[in-house]
Image (cartoon, rainbow, N blue to C red):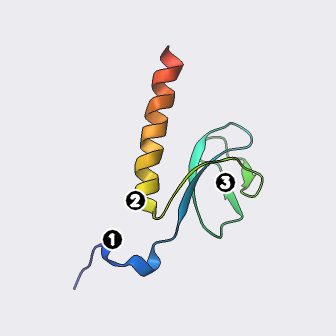
Amino acid sequence: MWKRLSEDKQEMKPTSIVKCTKCAGLMLTTKGQRTKVCPYCGAHVDLLQAQQVASASNPFEASEMLRKLKKEQGLNRKA
């Protein structure tokens, strides 16, 4: 039987939003990750050095937060 991802809390890790150290693009990371490739510029980001913008208890909350932050950035750039 299928189950929703939200029903399987054991696999949900705390998730953070960090800024790329090269281009300042925002990306999601999970607890325990040490590095990540930036989806915008391709830089290898040391997550211990990167600025943490926000954190959430699960990836779904973090994803919603990231969408809002990107929307706000888009509005600020037009001003």
Label 3: element kind: strand
Task: Classify the position of the N terminus by image quarter.
Answer: bottom left
Disc 3 designates what residue? 37
* Mark 3 closeness class: few <14, some 14–19, many ≥20 residues within 10 Å: few
For marks 2 and 1, give the CA distance.
9 Å
Disc 1 designates what residue? 6
- The residue drawn where x is 74% and y is 39% is 22
Direction from residue 23 to residue 11 in the image, left or right: left
- Discs 2, 1 touching: Cβ within 8 Å: yes
Q: Position of residue 5 (x, y in %)?
A: 34, 72
Q: Quadrant of residue 20?
A: top right
Q: Position of residue 28 (x, y in %)?
A: 55, 54
Mark closer to the chain start, 2 or 1: 1
Label 2: element kind: helix
* Mark 2 closeness class: few <14, some 14–19, many ≥20 residues within 10 Å: some
How many badges with numbers are in the image?
3
